[in-house]
Image (cartoon, rainbow, N blue to C red):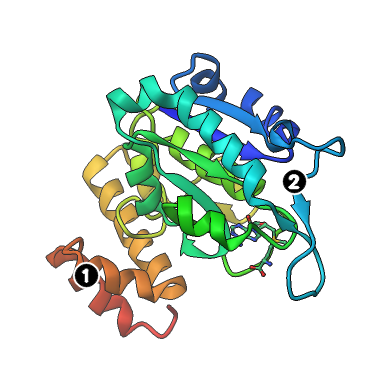
């Protein structure tokens, strides 16, 4: 998968591409991240890529023309890849975008990659967005100084879903949201820590019992913290008879 990133701060990406379970995917180019410094597409002596907003007000706005030159360069460079994998969408990170969810990441991870545009200042001239952007994505209801962190979040989340990136392929299938629910609690050594012991079922070796215990903990965590996800899982047909029975049972437990 190829991902092109259009940014004013390419240096923010380098350290991230060199660490963790995702590093090998970047080094082998299984996930091919290419950085495009926007200032290289400015034409004046000051390498200007922003200017004051029409109508007045604080802050600066990213200019259409350097962005269009950069985008044309990326599209030309991607021509061979896009001919095989399909035209890559241009994604702009914005607080006004659709929230980034695991199902969006899953769709992205199995697609042709993308061109990611990281905004800065007050954002991008609307005319560039109207002409070129296929999708706006938000990291949440808060305002960051730039789109680089959302771009890194999407790259990381999609890379760990690529085949062979995680040591244990089952690992991401058990993560929160993968099956529509939050994750269950995890334990490791020591078996006993003061008065806190590892739940005995996890030491039993009974795989069916362990799976049942984990599923019930997932349902409990989700109903307590994110009841909206339970409703969504129900609508998507992801809860079976045993799940519904357990939800009814814990629904009458005042401790939950
Ligand atoms: C200071 S912000 C601009 C905020 C913009 N004036 C607004 O109020 O929506 C600069 C850039 O950071 C990025 N950004 C900030 N918050 C974000 C979020 N929650 N999700 C995705 N991108 C964000 C966007 O690319 C944005 O253009």
Q: Residue, x 70% and y 59% (percent of image)?
A: 144
Q: Is residue 33 left or right of residue 30?
A: right
Q: Is residue 124 visible?
A: yes
Q: Residue furthest front?
A: 44
1 or 2: mark nearer the eye: 2
Q: Is residue 181 above or below residue 151?
A: below
Q: Which mark is residue 166?
A: none
Residue that protrudes farthest toward the right in the picture: 46
Question: Where 219 falls versus 1 (above or below)?
Answer: below
Instruction: Decide: is 127 above or below 75.
Output: below
Q: Residue at 31% of width from left, 85% of height from top?
A: 252
The foreground one among 49 and 32 is: 49
Residue at x 32% of width, y 77% of height: 250
Q: Label 1's element?
A: helix
- Residue contact at pointers 1 and 2, CB within 8 angstroms: no
Tell me which corner region of the image, top left, top right, bottom left or bottom right, holds residue 52.
Answer: bottom right
Whichever of callouts 1 and 2 sits on the residue coming sooner in the sequence is: 2
Camera-side residue: 50 or 238? Answer: 50
The residue singled out by tag 2 in the image is 49
Asked whether, in this view, residue 56 is left or right of residue 69, the answer is: right
User: Residue at the spot x=40%, y=27% of the render?
Assistant: 1
Please state the total of marks drawn on the protein image: 2
**Quarter of image, ligand 1:** bottom right
Q: CA distance from mark 1 to mark 2?
A: 48 Å
| Residue corresponding to mark 1 | 234
Residue 243: where, in percent of width, then height?
21, 65
Judge whether 241 appears above or below 36 on screen.
below
In the figure, is residue 21 to the left or right of 143? Answer: left
Q: Residue furthest top?
A: 28
Q: Position of residue 36 (x, y in %)?
A: 63, 31
Q: Is residue 43 left or right of residue 67?
A: right
Query: How many other residues sit within 10 Å of disc 1, few (<14), some (14-19) or many (≥20)?
Result: some
């Amino acid at each position: 998968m190829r991902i092109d990133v259009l940014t004013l701060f390419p240096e923010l990406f380098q350290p991230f591409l060199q660490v963790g379970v995702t590093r090998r995917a970047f080094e082998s180019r299984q996930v091919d991240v290419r950085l495009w410094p926007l200032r290289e597409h400015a034409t004046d002596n000051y390498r200007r890529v922003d200017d004051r907003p029409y109508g007045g007000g604080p802050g600066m706005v990213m200019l259409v023309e350097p962005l269009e030159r950069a985008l044309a360069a990326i599209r030309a460079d991607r021509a061979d890849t896009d001919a095989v994998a399909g035209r890559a969408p241009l994604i702009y990170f914005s607080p006004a975008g659709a929230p980034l969810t695991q199902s969006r990441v899953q769709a992205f991870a199995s697609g042709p990659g993308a061109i990611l545009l990281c905004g800065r200042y007050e954002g991008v001239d609307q005319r560039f967005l109207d002409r070129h952007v296929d999708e706006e994505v938000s990291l949440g209801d808060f305002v960051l100084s730039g789109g680089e962190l959302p771009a890194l979040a999407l790259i990381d989340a999609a890379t760990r879903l690529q085949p062979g990136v995680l040591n244990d392929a089952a690992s991401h299938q058990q993560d929160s949201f993968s099956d529509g629910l939050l994750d269950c609690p995890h334990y490791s050594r020591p078996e006993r820590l003061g008065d806190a012991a590892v739940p005995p079922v996890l030491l039993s070796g009974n795989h069916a019992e362990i799976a049942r215990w984990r599923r019930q903990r997932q349902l409990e965590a989700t109903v307590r913290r994110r009841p909206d996800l339970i409703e969504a899982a129900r609508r998507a047909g992801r809860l079976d008879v045993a799940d519904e029975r357990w939800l009814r049972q814990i629904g009458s437990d005042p401790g939950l």
